[in-house]
Amino acid sequence: EAVSRSLLLLLTAAIFSLLRRLFDNVKKGAIFSMKSVRLIRLMGWCFVIYFALVSAIGNGLNHLISRNLSLELLDTDFSSASRGAVRLFLLPPHLDLDLTAIFFGLFAFALAEVFRQGLLLKEENDLTV
């Protein structure tokens, strides 16, 4: 348990460090740069890993291989949805996954692609001037 909490703390620190470095790039005027794209992608991977760790810790390995494999077609807990915890479709009823971190990760990957496209446009514009 202490090791998993340390890993989560380390990932949180890494995300904030990457965010600080991204803001430093913006401050320097290097918004659409390959470095910014890499930083945002790394943040995305940190969120995905964070999600995996939180899910593994929260559910425990003994719950992942369960005797009860009855599936729920759709189960959304609206009381906890305001906190970002939505149960995943087609999972055993005891598996609660907080999808907030994975959504942040996917958003970071999409944002990295937007920055990459912006970099391509910037490079093309630099060549035409």
Image (spheres, helix red, strand yellow):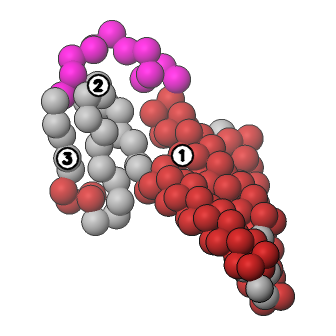
Query: What's the residue type where badge 3 is placed?
Result: Thr
Measured from the top left, where is residue 78 in percent x and y? 18, 56
- Quadrant of res 114: bottom right
Residue depicted at 54% across the width and 46% down the height: 51
Measured from the top left, where is residue 57 in percent x and y? 55, 37
> Where is 118 relative to 95, above or below?
below
Q: Secondary structure at mark 3?
A: loop
> Where is 31 relative to 85, above or below?
below
In the image, is 126 to the left or to the right of 107?
A: right
Q: Is residue 21 magenta?
A: no
Query: What's the residue type where badge 1 is placed?
Result: Phe
User: In this figure, which residue is indicated by the disc labeled 1?
Assistant: 51
Going from N to C along the chain, the mark reached first, 2 or 3, is 3
Instruction: Confirm whether residue 3 shows in the render.
Output: yes
User: In this figure, which residue is indicated by the disc labeled 3?
Assistant: 76
In the image, is 68 to the left or to the right of 30?
A: left
Label 3 crowding class (10 Å Cα cut-off): few <14, some 14-19, many 20+? few
Query: Majority secondary structure of the magenta segment?
Result: loop
Q: Residue furthest front?
A: 128
User: In this figure, which residue is indicated by the disc labeled 2?
Assistant: 92
> Where is 31 relative to 48, above or below?
below
* Segment colored magenta: 61-72
Q: Secondary structure at mark 2?
A: loop
Residue depicted at 21% across the width and 50% down the height: 77
Pick the front one: 26 or 121: 121
Q: Is residue 67 magenta?
A: yes
